[in-house]
Image: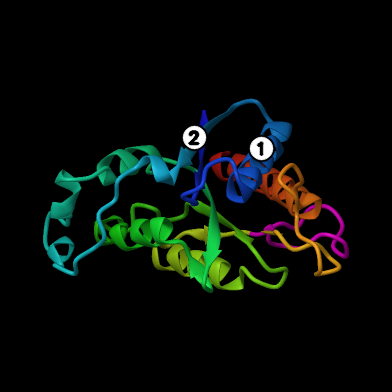
Amino acid sequence: MIKVSLIVGSPRKNRSCNFLIDKAIEGIKSVSADFTINKIQITDYNIIPCNGCDACLKSPNDCPLAKEDDTNALEDLILGSTALIIAAPNYFGSVGSQIKVLIDRSRPWKMKNYLLRDVILAPMASTGLRNGGQGVISDLINFGLIQGMIIVANNLGSPVLEGNLPITSLQKYNLKEFVGKDETDELAGLIAYDLGKRVAELSLKIKK
């Protein structure tokens, strides 16, 4: 079985990031039922912020803080995945603190000779205003590049009507209205669905 891990990187469950992840899961399942879907709610885990001790630079490259929080549990869930999809919220132009702490604490994975090397990474973002979210995508791409991952975006569907990156917004297209409680950003959902398909198809090719 091919494992695809998906991280809902928001402290708020069942909101925009969760919407994107669920759409990506639908896209994955549309390709094949033979995937192990590993959905992770980041807010379920206690992750202590990095304190810059640099212990991970020395063999065995472990973080001493891991004895006090849930990073080892997250490591067990994430490592061994063929692909990783992360949806993170835009908080003042960057990823939310929950995902930023995970990124910082993932340094041992790099120091242990790139444990995420060649894992597919697909970034997604949620934002309040229509033109936000690019900083989140940039943060996630930088994380993937530093870890030696393969960054992918959507290239399915219409190359004119669909974007390459799922960024869902609370702001509607006329900019004067916002998405209601029971409404969703349909275009972002479509792109997330197609990105899930893209990740699934690439995962199958890599595993052949």
Specify the quadrant of the image occupied by residue 176.
Answer: bottom right
Q: Residue at x 51, y 37 (%)?
A: 39
Circle 1 packing at 10 Å, graded few (<14), some (14-19), many (20+), is: many
What is the three-letter code of the residue carrying label 1? Ile
Q: Which percent across, then down, holds residue 23?
A: 69, 41
Q: Residue at x 75, y 50 (%)?
A: 180
Task: Let me know if residue 161 is in the magenta part.
Answer: yes
**Mark drawn on residue 192:** none
Q: Secondary structure at mark 1?
A: helix
The outermost residue toward the top is: 33
Left-right relation of 20 to 67 = right
Left-right relation of 64 to 43 = left
Circle 2 packing at 10 Å, graded few (<14), some (14-19), many (20+), is: some
Q: Secondary structure at mark 2?
A: strand
Left-right relation of 86 to 77 = right
What is the three-letter code of the residue carrying label 2? Asn
Q: Residue at x 34, y 42 (%)?
A: 45
**Relative to residue 28, is residue 114 depicted above or below?**
below
Residue with the mark numbered 2: 38
Residues under labels 2 and 1: Cα distance? 12 Å
Q: Which residues are magenta?
A: 153-167
Q: Which percent across, then down, holds residue 49?
A: 26, 60
Q: Which percent across, then down, holds residue 107?
A: 29, 61
Residue with the mark numbered 1: 28
Q: Earlier in the sequence, mark 2 or mark 1?
A: 1
Q: Residue at x 76, y 59 (%)?
A: 178
Q: Which percent across, then down, holds residue 76?
A: 32, 38
Give the camera-side residue of 103 and 173: 173
